Every structure is written in C-alpha cells, then in structure tokens.
Amino acid sequence: MSFQRPLELFGFPTHDACPTGEPWDRLRTELANAPVRDAKCPFCEENCNKIRKAKPNPLIGNCTAGLIRKGEHAAWIVCPKRFEQDDIIFKDAAAAFGLTGTTVYLAKELKLGGAGNLDFALVTLKDDKVDDFIGIEVQSMGTSGSGSIWTARNDYLAGALKEQYSYGMNTKDASKKILVQMLHKGRQLSRLKKKYLLVIQDHLLGQLRSQFDLSHFRPADAGDFVYIHSYKLECVNGKYLLKLQEKISIDSMTLPSILAPNPDRDKLVTEKSLQKTVSDKRKRGKVRELPATI
C-alpha cells in the first residue's frame, strides 16, 4: 500500500513497530528544552544531524519519505547520509572507474577552491601521492511543510503513525542547486583530469530531465570527466536498499549546456508573447514612466 509519510526514521523502516532500546526510549521521553542529540545514524559512523529547524532544533530523524503525486508513489531520500548505506555508492564508483584490486581511501568534505566542498572523494595513492581521484557529491531531497513530518515522527514514537501526512518535495530548488554545483565543481576537477561524480535518486534524475536539457549526456564514457549515477531505493525483505540504476556522463566542454531549459517542456518566448506581456502590464497600470533625466 502507498503511504505519504516517513518511510524511515533514524534509519529504521516505519512499516515495523517502533523499537525499544537505544535511542528510542530516550527519544520517547525527551524534554522539549533538552532534546536528544546523540542518536547514531546506522548509515554512517556519526550521530544523526537531521534536525527540525524550529528551536531548540530537536532531531527529526527522517531519512526517507513517501510522496504521492498524480496518483504515483515514490520513496524519496531526504537526508544525504542515507546514501552512505553499506558503502554501496562508493563500491559502485570504485568498480565503475576501475579502482578495484587496489587500496582505495575514502575522504569526506574536501575543499575545492572557490567552488566549495566536495562531499566525498575516492583516492588511490602512488609513492604516497594522489594518483586516482574521484570527487563525489550526493544530493538528497528537501521537504516543504515539514511540520507534518515532525508530527509523524512523534506519532511513530507513540505507536500511532498514520498513513497520510501533508508535505511536499522541493524538487525545483534541489534541481537548480545541484546542476550549478555540478557545473562549477565538474569544471574544476576536469581541469586537473580528475573525475566528478554526482549521486542522486532515479526520481531526481527524471526531474532534471524534465526541466533541463540533459540531451548531451550519454551512457558512461571513460573519456569523460563528469558523471551521474542514479539509484533506485527498493524495499527488499522489509529493508530499503540502494540499487544502481543508470550511469551517464558528459564531456567538460559541453557541460554548461545542462543549465539550458528542456526545449520540449518550456514554452520559448516569442516577439508576440513579449509584446503582449508588456501591453497587459500597461493596461493594468503596472508600469510607470521614469522622470526625465539630463
């Protein structure tokens, strides 16, 4: 059955009853002014940092959320740490870029000049110097109306999780943000002849294709420097697992084209439509004449 509600909280699937023990017992009894801060994330080696934005910023713990749109159900990853499950994305990347059979190191949060930080990098060494380097970014989805997710979180702790909660996904915001990052960071790394990999869900890749011109991407080519790996989140034996769905790439010279709108989707402005827009504004008194200047 399709639910619009959190599908995983603190790494645990919500189709199962809320567990007892750590950190669940403390979460149930936490005080409003002293929220739990040290709930371990099962997907990485750190504490959960998925907080509610309202003060005092308690942990909301939402990893994955179901969304029903136009009658279709999708499970969206809403926390970037969720992508770190069992090192799946890193193992897939190492295999895709021919790093198997050698020692591979994983680094986090690497500064990339003025382009900001990389989420991760796979690195191999030769004579104690960097040999292969794969910069990796992950993009999860942000939610809108997340007050309902906070309600769902507390309902789950109380054993009263409902089937439907009202919230949405900020797909447009995430799409624009990640493409700009891909452009800046991908170009930086390609200058050094190093690879850049964006890891996203299949849902987001579909959203990107509907909004932007990704026609220059092709099946992953070893000669390119900018790649996308898209993943499907499948429920297998009651557990959600990442599965690599598609590998595509683009050359660095064509990379700026990704910011162009999808020509099959967007209505392109014409001289006639521009004239009508200005005319309508004038009729409604929405334009004013600038005072004469010398």
Image (cartoon, rainbow, N blue to C red):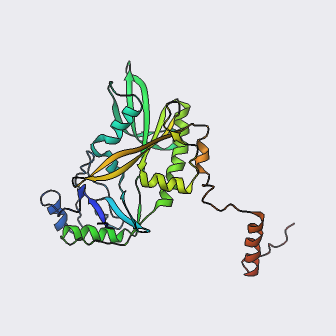
Q: Is residue 32 visible?
A: no
Residue at x 44%, y 37% (from the top left corner): 135
| Residue 122 to residue 155: above or below | above
Quarter-wise, where is residue 86 in the image? top left
Residue at x 68%, y 60% (from the top left corner): 268
* Quarter of the view holding residue 36: bottom left
Residue 254, how many percent across, how many down?
61, 40
Give the residue at the far right of this rendering: 294
Percent of width and height locating residue 200:
42, 49
Residue 147 shows in the view: yes
Question: Which residue lies at the image location 41% right of the left edge and 68% below the top edge?
Answer: 71
Residue 36 appears left or right of 194: left
Number of numbered tags placed on the structure image:
0
What quarter of the picture does the C terminus occupy? bottom right
Q: Is residue 251 left or right of residue 280?
A: left
Q: Position of residue 80 (x, y in %)?
A: 36, 51
Of residue 168 and residue 191, the one placed in the foreground of this image is 168
| Residue 143, quarter of the rendered image | bottom left
Q: Nearer the viewer, residue 135 or 291?
A: 135
The quadrant of the rendering that contains the N terminus is bottom left
